[in-house]
Amino acid sequence: MKKRVEEQTKTAGIKPTILLDVPGEREDGSALTDHQVRARLVAKGFENVTEVGAEWMRCTLADVQTAITELRTGQKLTGTHHETFPMRAEQAEAVVKTRDYFNSVWGENMHAVPRFLWNAKMRFGKTFTSYQLAKTLGATRVLVVTFKPAVEDAWQTDLESHADFNGWQYMSKQSGVDPTTVAKGKPLVYFGSFQDLLGRDKAGNIKAVNHWIHEINWDLVIFDEYHFGAWRDTAKELFEGEDDSQIKAETKLEYNPELDAYNEELDELNEQEAEFLPITTRAYLYLSGTPFKALATGEFIEEQIFNWTYTDEQRAKDNFGKSFPGKWNPYGGLPQMRLMTYQMPDELLAIASSGEFDEFDLNAFFAATGTGKGATFQHKSDVQKWLDIIRGGYAPSQVDNLKERPPFPYSDVRLLPYLQHSFWFLPNVAACHAMANLLAEPQNTYFRKYKVLTVAGASAGIGLDALPPVRKAIGSGHEAGSITLSCGKLTAGVTVVQWSSILMLRNLRSPETYFQAAFRVQSPWTQKNPHGDNPSEEEIYKPACFVFDFAPTRALRQLADYGIGLSPNEPNPEKAVEDLVSFLPVLAYDGSHMTQVDAGGILDIAMAGTSATLLARKWESALLVNVDNDTLKRILSNEEAMRAVMNIEGFRALGDNVIETVINKSEKVKDTKRAKGDGLTAKEKKELSEEEKEYKSKRKQIQEKLIKFATRIPAFMYLTDFRENTLQDVITRMEPDLFRTVTGLSVDEFHLLVSLNVFNSGHMNQAVFAFRRYEDASLSYTGIDSHEGLRSFGLYDTVVAREVEA
């Protein structure tokens, strides 16, 4: 092809860039010629530019691709439906598994409304694959509802660019077209935010502009970025560092206060969608990269879930490279993430440590006051020392004496390429401005090679408005480096491909929030056709990416929680974390050595650094107990179960009819709302509001009593000496009398409640594991081997090896 192009351009004195290089064959094997492609473009109405010769056309690359696709397939395409790539293996697997599950449910009950979850990390290709599922199901009315309106572009582009969806109609609020007027014979995809489509007005009524959505019988409703149990708190945590007005503006993009009416239903994941969403559909598809709460609480059973995690992605990348060496790897551009943690010198730890274990408090260390040029750090001289440390210009005496200096971020030549464009995640606006000021001071000449971009506060813009200035400043990314300072902006739903590392300089509570921010740097940075003569060539600029964290225990605790959260069906927490760190290496600097930490070591550090308070929270977690209506009905219909719960301390004080009251009142309220909708009178609304308050309060009291019972289990574990047996066996076979004395329930009563799913055994496994790991690590720290020769830990209903055999 290069020879043919040279023949055409050399005489014209043109230096060409080859943008497309595809085989010139039809599906039947016959050959395509450039003359046929030009003829097809002319037939489609594109201009034949005669002033430079009859062989030239005025059109876009996508137009040419569409013409070639038409000639190959023999079909006429609307617009530029030029893409013809097939689904990858994992995408096809997701479609088949979901389709088969839906059909199995409909086979048993044609009126059933099945639901399915794709636990798929970013870059799985969820939009394209979702459309393939809709096509497979024969769906002609598809509603896409998202919590992140910024993702609309991907949904529209995929539908309008691929030949598989030729003739499909895409609409959204931005279209300015009345959806009720669309042609009925063509498939319709309507995209909207949860806030716009399902929110209520101030009177509590469905917005008039959206009535049509509730009148259509949809074939498939897709919930994108589905974090029912976590997205509100996650959105708020990400922007806690912004000014008050900014917090309100940023979180409104993620979570609209109009949705407060749905709070209980959103938290009770076992409720059916029809109970709180006034939409009719044949099926629901949920998409999320971090659906931890939904996975943990058993909202979806195994046959209702397709998983494609970071671990799956990196394993596929590794396997493809081994199986097809020398071939283009479709996963090749996806960088491997690496976590590096650093223990700060004692002199810095001393000024910003808190908690039972004196953990390094990032928020306290980077505390600042003021804004703009007047912002400064409270511990400015110590933050300066930290800057000197990360560039290798300052070290305590014990480090000076080391033969091999540790790899600090801005000092090690192996790390510097990944710090050309970095993201510094700071506690608040003042800290971002203070850091920008400090980096500009004369002593920090080293950092002047980087453009410092301060993306915090009102001046940086709201939501996606903050993105264009950053992209413009970074440009191609191959010239000057950059440091982006943020305390929340650009940490969700955006892509800046040049970011290759993130410095975690603030405290974050949830693993969802931590890794949502961390994965900003895992976007592929590649260039196709780098030399302009081979569109099949791809240059990878970012084979790896880095997370640098300066609070090691917190970082490893987040990693452990993330690994366990990704594998809720894996009974051995160590195995869950081991799978993750096999593709996410962890290097920890302890003040003198940098060593790679394995899964067991991560859990040991995480648990040894867990305070008694944090450990207790695992036994005070609402996730340990289920109080949704389905579970309460199972208790109510079982006399033995009712007697058992009444034996739990304080439960009888709630009244004999407390469970029945919660069920009846909650269902009455929902039935009334569904039946009357907007027709409720002011008096009826007030009455419903009172009944809602009553049953919500009683449900909370039931939950509190069950959790109080769960907190007795650690006391039982302290008193029993059987470590290698499952807690279930210890309770039921070995020390049943002790269990009743400590908890107030007999073995049979407890076993019955577990069988009714009142207590979540999966979360109990994790809580028991944390307790025993913490207890053993704490004793080892004092030089005591709690149980000599111990080879395994008994969890609630599972036994795991104490150490993974080599």
Image (cartoon, rainbow, N blue to C red):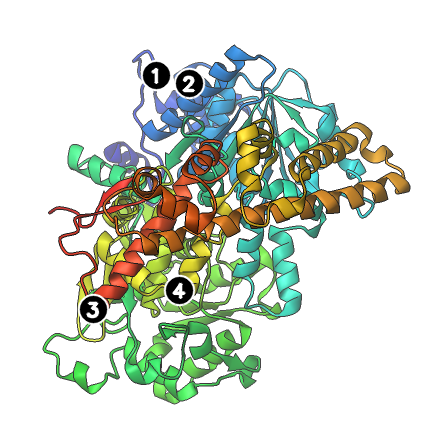
Secondary-structure class at tag 3: loop
Report the amino acid beneath label 2.
Answer: Leu
* Residue to which mark 2 is pinned: 71
* Residue to which mark 4 is pinned: 612
Q: Point out the frontmost of discs 1 and 4.
A: 4
In the rendered structure, the answer to whether residue 205 lies left or right of residue 423 reads: right
* Relative to 307, residue 437 above or below: below
Q: What residue is rendered at 53% in x and 14% in y?
A: 106
Report the amino acid beneath label 3.
Answer: Val
Q: Earlier in the sequence, mark 2 or mark 4?
A: 2
10 Å crowding of disc 1: few (<14), some (14-19), many (20+): some
* Residue to which mark 3 is pinned: 413
Q: Earlier in the sequence, mark 3 or mark 2?
A: 2
Confirm whether residue 285 shows in the render: yes
Where, by quadrant of the figure, is residue 319 drawn? Answer: top left
Q: Earlier in the sequence, mark 1 or mark 3?
A: 1
